[in-house]
Image (cartoon, rainbow, N blue to C red):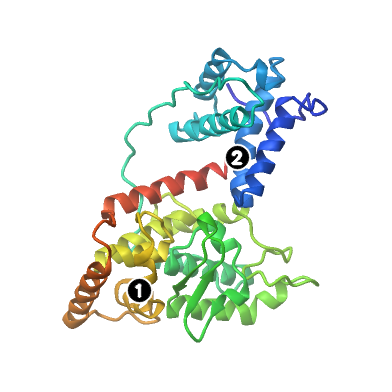
Amino acid sequence: MVRRKLRPFTDVVNPRGLHAMEQRFLEAMAIKGYSKQTVDTRRSRLDLFVEWCAERSVVTPLDVTKPVLDRYQRMLFLLRKPNGKPLGFQSQVMRLVAVKMFFRWLTRENYLPANPAADLELPRAPRRLPRVVLTADEVERVMVQPDVTDPLGLRDRAVLETLYSTGIRRGELIALSVHDLDVNRRTLLIREGKGKKDRVIPIGERALFWIEKYLDDVRPTLVGPRDDGTLFLSTLGIALNGVTLSPRVRKYVEDGSGKSGSCHIFRHTMATLMLEGGADIRFIQAMLGHALLTTTEIYTRVSVLKLQEIHAATHPGANLGRRARSTSSSDTLRDDAHDVENEAKPEAHTPTPRELLAELDEEAIDELEGDI
């Protein structure tokens, strides 16, 4: 079965209807400080459920029973995307998790006497295929794909270089402001990343070169009458969005490397290449903005200056010209990693590279879901 585009709900005037309860749930999330992106994602997942229920005259939370939820889960299993492919198991899980959280909130707020989704079993995802990561040479071939003599090509080159150098998320790149870039210190301020956490990370010389060229030659021609300071602009003079950005990046990646991937592939590639270059995993965590550690004290011990040294020494595209790492540089990296390890509390869990890359896999799924 192929789902058609969502149509207007039939119970919008019912204050106790599923649609009204969904709006209250989403409002409660916003009040608790969840990001707009998280709320919008939860909304899109619940909209599918509420519309499916409305088509079956299930209009209030009291009408939802365990058999109804089982039927909905079966529908997700049979659902086909516009390209004819089924939803991935992880996508099914994320939609069911949204429903479970919705009904848990309804029960906790006493809108329901019991939770019909309490015993809903989530599908077990199969083992994933090996992740797609670019080699350093493949990245270089991707970087020369944009036509830098064209304004949009030059902008795209700056976007690609930024993704590769910093490993930031697609949403973080879209939200960048010109004021978040510190050229003198060679740093980038990420405001309200995942979990609404700010972080300052280094950005390489080469990425800075292309960003500055974009700022000088292209951005003034794209900016509208009201400049809100967004760094990367579309032809409409507004911020880029994932729906249009991902296909452009995907084409550059496929044409340059023959591999499939979009914005997130550069995040994965940066982490992998820095690991292979000898960077301690905790420095990479600080770059990625991950919260895998059980304590946050380690992040406070990783200064931006030290992070810049590690980034420049282990990231293949950090410098305008490739520089070979000396033996003494490798020794210094090992010593720095040892110092950070000694500063960490004994009970703090340091994830393995496999755990770090597994979390990147989960992020990639969330990004792809946003494009469906």
- Horizontal side of 132 relative to 8 (left or right) equals left
Query: Residue at 56% across / 66% down in the picture?
Result: 191
Q: Residue 42 carries which label?
A: 2
Residue 290 falls in image quadrant = bottom left
* Residue on which disc 1 sits: 311
Relative depth, front residue between 20 and 243? 20
Residue 279 falls in image quadrant = bottom left
Indicate which label's residue lies in the foreground, 1 or 2.
2
Count of labels shown? 2
Query: Residue at 37% across / 54% down in the picture?
Result: 292
Image quarter in which the N terminus is found: top right
- Horizontal side of 234 relative to 128 (left or right) equals right
**In this orientation, does residue 6 appear?**
no
Image quarter in which the C terminus is found: top right
Q: Position of residue 165 (x, y in %)?
A: 43, 69
- Horizontal side of 296 relative to 57 (left or right) equals left
Location of residue 35 with respect to 79 vertically, above or below: below
Distance from Cα at disc 1 to Cα at disc 2? 35 Å
Q: Is mark 1 on a helix, strand or loop?
A: helix
Mark 1 or 2, nearer chain start: 2
Q: Position of residue 27 (x, y in %)?
A: 69, 43
Query: Residue at 60% across / 43% down in the picture?
Result: 41
For the residue marked with disc 2, what is the amino acid?
Arg
Query: Residue at 56% across / 57% down in the picture?
Result: 171
| Mark 1 neighbour class, 10 Å CA radius: few under 14, some 14 to 19, many 20 or more | many
